[in-house]
């Protein structure tokens, strides 16, 4: 049996503080632009089936119980108690939390308390720039305050993350933009945005990426499936190849998040470039019962010291549970098969399992 006693969730978000009805709960299971097919619900997905498999027992119900029964039990326990039971039942011992999503989500400290775990903050670059812009009156003050904010964030966070692929696409020019180019782009963006306007200017996105690289903290880059309606061909991690090459040797690790359905391309980059790592998590949550196949495909190409677990969870503590359980099950199935076939020794399989579950994340993010 392959054991993974400790899990470091290297990318996730907080959970909702509010009580949820069936329809609201469903909406968080799948990122879709519209309703499900007639006569079905959003539980009729690999993620939905995985929630029904793994979460009911943690709330005192049978696996695969009806969604309405599950939500009734959740409401009976209350949002705090159900969240505490689910998070503590996930087996995750450390959360790295992207605090850049809107909504009434728990902060890292709250997540740590509910889950009896540790938690550290990941700073989202685009949100940081937007917050600075809201309080800066001129281009000069914006750029100065942004540099100061990135520096201050680097002192407390464990990583930066960027959604440049979501906002613009990953086919960005790889080199850092010049000072004049940055000032011009900042002037145009500030003049055209209202308070709270999102940053999607490619020059400023590049400026943010290179500011993060200069900090020395790991930089997480979103790739693959994401926001509903997103042109995912613009988020294929292979589009980052020139940027990856340009950042080689600078001392900053890059972590390619999510990746699916381009997880093999992400794994390939991790295999070629010493400073690139690949996330194995959110792809497993999406693929549910097929998670072992996807994990095996990542293991085909990425060196074992370059693969990190995450749940990618947001909003629902159930997604932390599903991410952790599917990862453990997939890892046990894949490595256990290779041991049974004689391709791997049990000692090597156990060592690699520990690397993927927590060891690699502890090394990359400098965790104790």
Image (cartoon, rainbow, N blue to C red):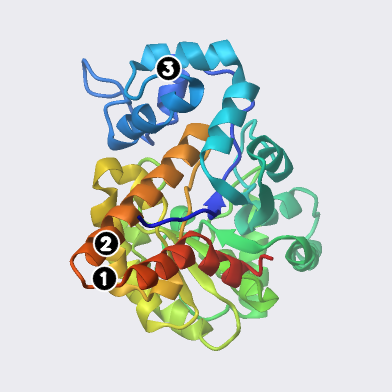
Query: At which x and y percent is residue 182?
Result: 64, 71
Q: Quadrant of residue 148?
A: bottom right
| Secondary structure type for disc 3 | helix
N-terminal of the two: label 2 or label 3?
A: 3
Query: At which x and y percent is residue 253?
Result: 55, 75
Q: How far apart are marks 2 and 3 (CA)?
A: 32 Å
Residue at the outermost bottom position = 249
Q: Is residue 256 visible?
A: no
Q: Distance between the residues labelled 2 and 1?
A: 6 Å
CB of mark 1 within 8 Å of CB of mark 3? no
Q: Quadrant of the C terminus?
A: bottom right
Viewer-closest of 366 and 99: 366
Q: Is residue 40 visible?
A: yes
| Secondary structure type for disc 2 | helix
- Vertical arrangement, residue 117 with respect to residue 86, above or below: below
CB of mark 2 within 8 Å of CB of mark 1? yes
Viewer-closest of 157 and 355: 355
Q: Left or right of 216: which side holds 361?
A: left
Q: Name the residue under label 2.
A: 296
Q: Name the residue under label 3.
A: 70
Q: Left or right of 155: which side holds 22?
A: left
* Residue 138 disc label: none
Q: Distance between the residues labelled 1 and 3?
A: 38 Å
Q: In which quarter of the image is the N terminus?
A: bottom left
| Secondary structure type for disc 1 | helix
- Vertical arrangement, residue 25 with respect to residue 142, above or below: above
Viewer-closest of 36 and 316: 316
Q: Name the residue under label 1.
A: 300
């Amino acid at each position: 049996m392959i054991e993974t006693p400790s899990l470091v969730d290297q990318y996730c978000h907080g959970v909702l503080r509010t009580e949820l009805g069936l329809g609201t709960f469903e909406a968080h299971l799948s990122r879709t632009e519209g309703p499900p097919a007639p006569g079905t619900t959003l539980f009729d997905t690999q993620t939905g089936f995985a929630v029904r498999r793994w979460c009911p027992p943690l709330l005192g119900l049978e696996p695969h119980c009806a969604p309405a029964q599950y939500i009734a039990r959740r409401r009976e326990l209350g949002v705090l108690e159900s969240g505490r039971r689910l998070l503590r039942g996930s087996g995750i011992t450390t959360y790295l939390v992207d605090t850049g999503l809107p909504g009434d989500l728990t902060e890292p400290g709250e997540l740590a308390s509910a889950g009896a775990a540790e938690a550290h903050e990941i700073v989202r670059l685009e949100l940081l720039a937007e917050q600075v812009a809201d309080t800066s009156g001129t281009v000069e003050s914006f750029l100065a305050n942004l540099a100061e904010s990135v520096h201050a964030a680097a002192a407390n966070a464990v990583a930066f993350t960027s959604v440049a692929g979501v906002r613009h696409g990953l086919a960005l020019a790889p080199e850092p933009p010049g000072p004049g180019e940055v000032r011009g782009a900042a002037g145009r963006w500030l003049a055209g945005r209202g308070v709270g306007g999102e940053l999607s200017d490619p020059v400023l996105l590049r400026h943010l990426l290179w500011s993060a690289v200069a900090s020395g903290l790991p930089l997480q880059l979103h790739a693959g499936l994401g926001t509903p309606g997103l042109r995912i061909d613009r988020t294929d991690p292979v589009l980052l190849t020139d940027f990856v090459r340009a950042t080689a040797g600078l001392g900053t690790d890059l972590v390619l998040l999510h990746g699916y359905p381009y997880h093999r391309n992400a794994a390939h980059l991790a295999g070629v470039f010493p400073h690139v790592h690949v996330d194995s998590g959110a792809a497993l949550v999406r693929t549910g019962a097929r998670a072992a196949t996807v994990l095996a495909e990542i293991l085909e190409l990425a060196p074992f010291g370059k693969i990190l677990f995450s749940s990618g969870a947001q909003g629902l503590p159930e997604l932390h549970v599903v991410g952790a359980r599917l990862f453990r099950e997939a890892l046990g199935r894949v490595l256990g098969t290779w041991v049974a076939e004689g391709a791997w020794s049990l000692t090597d399989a156990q060592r690699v399992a520990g690397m993927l579950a927590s060891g690699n994340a502890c090394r990359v993010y400098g965790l104790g």
